[in-house]
């Protein structure tokens, strides 16, 4: 299939890699030109957004958030204005569900079909085709897209109409943010108490409260590895989106609000371009640890 792809960040690069491996022809565009890995060599890099989406039956989108969506999708120079009628737009951006609904309406007004398709996972999952997609929009459009998502995904899930995928993404990210923050506090306590790192992870691996995040991020943190798989500044953006989404629905989320402030502090400390787990550096610092 001829696919247009907008957004070549950490996640977008992995998705394009697996689309190419599956035999699709991909024309990609990124707002900021950047060097790409050799695995993406078969992708055609468009000179403009309009070129990337023109005459493509499917356009996939993976941007950093609402501001990037508003810059790239609606408007006279955006993807909606330059895509052919009937094009399916699959938008994996983590965003405000209200923005997702606005974009779905704007796409429909242009004769386009819009799905919100955000993902759970980070660099490794994107690169290896192990993302989990949560999707909102017309069921028929989701069914049409599912075979294309298969080489990118560990699982795909249909949540309902437009914006329901975006809603589900923020629900899941609340749990991710809370676990990331609590893991940092737990590791600070363990280090301060002098627990052996290997022995610590040995039991955290197998307890009923363990998770892939605890097992993987725990080891990376204890090894001092904060190489970005998902930027900390993007976690702050997501935490702010969770607060707005909860407020719109009249749901108190005091824990999420506190975590958002912790991430703001981490960004203020210059940690925004490290992995989201660099929040743990603050927990260690406040505990008098290196």
Image (spheres, rainbow, N blue to C red):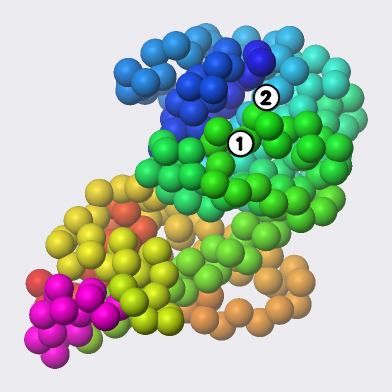
Horizontal placement of 119 versus 236: left or right? right
At 77% across and 39% down in the image, what residue appears?
142
Q: Is residue 126 above or below residue 200?
A: above
Q: Where residue 180 sits: x, y (%)?
A: 39, 70
* Nearest to N terminus: mark 2 or mark 1: 2
Q: Where residue 25 sits: x, y (%)?
A: 57, 13
At 65% across and 29% down in the image, what residue appears?
148
Magenta span of residues: 190-204
Neighbours of disc 2 within 10 Å: few (<14), some (14-19), many (20+): many
At 71% across and 14% down in the image, what residue appears?
56
Residue on which the image places disc 2: 59
Residue on which the image places disc 1: 150
Helix, strand or loop status at disc 1? helix
Q: Where residue 237 sits: x, y (%)?
A: 50, 56
Q: Where residue 2 sits: x, y (%)?
A: 65, 13
Asked if residue 25 can be seen in this view, the reply is yes
């Amino acid at each position: 299939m001829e696919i247009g792809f907008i957004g070549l960040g950490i996640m977008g690069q992995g998705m394009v890699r697996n689309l190419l491996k599956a035999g699709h022809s991909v024309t990609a565009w990124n707002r900021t030109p950047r060097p790409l890995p050799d695995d993406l060599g078969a992708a055609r890099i468009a000179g403009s957004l309009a070129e990337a989406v023109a005459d493509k039956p499917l356009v996939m989108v993976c941007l950093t958030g609402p501001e990037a969506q508003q810059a790239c999708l609606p408007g006279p120079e955006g993807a909606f204005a330059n895509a052919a009628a009937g094009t399916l737009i699959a938008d994996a951006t983590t965003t405000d569900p209200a923005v997702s609904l606005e974009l779905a309406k704007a796409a429909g007004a242009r004769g386009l079909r819009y799905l919100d398709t955000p993902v759970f996972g980070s660099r490794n999952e994107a690169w290896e085709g192990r993302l989990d997609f949560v999707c909102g929009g017309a069921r028929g459009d989701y069914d049409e897209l599912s075979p294309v998502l298969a080489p990118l995904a560990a699982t795909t899930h249909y949540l309902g109409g437009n914006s329901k995928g975006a809603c589900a993404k923020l629900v899941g990210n609340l749990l991710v943010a809370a676990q990331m923050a609590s893991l940092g506090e737990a590791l600070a306590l363990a280090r301060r108490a002098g627990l052996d790192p290997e022995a610590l992870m040995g039991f955290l691996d197998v307890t009923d409260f363990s998770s892939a995040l605890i097992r993987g991020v725990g080891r990376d943190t204890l090894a001092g590895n904060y190489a970005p798989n998902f930027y900390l500044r993007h976690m702050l953006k997501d935490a702010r989106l969770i607060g707005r989404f909860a407020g719109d629905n009249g749901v108190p989320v005091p824990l999420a609000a506190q975590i958002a402030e912790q991430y703001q502090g981490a960004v203020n400390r210059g940690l925004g371009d490290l992995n989201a787990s660099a929040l743990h550096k603050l927990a260690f610092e406040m505990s008098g640890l290196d």
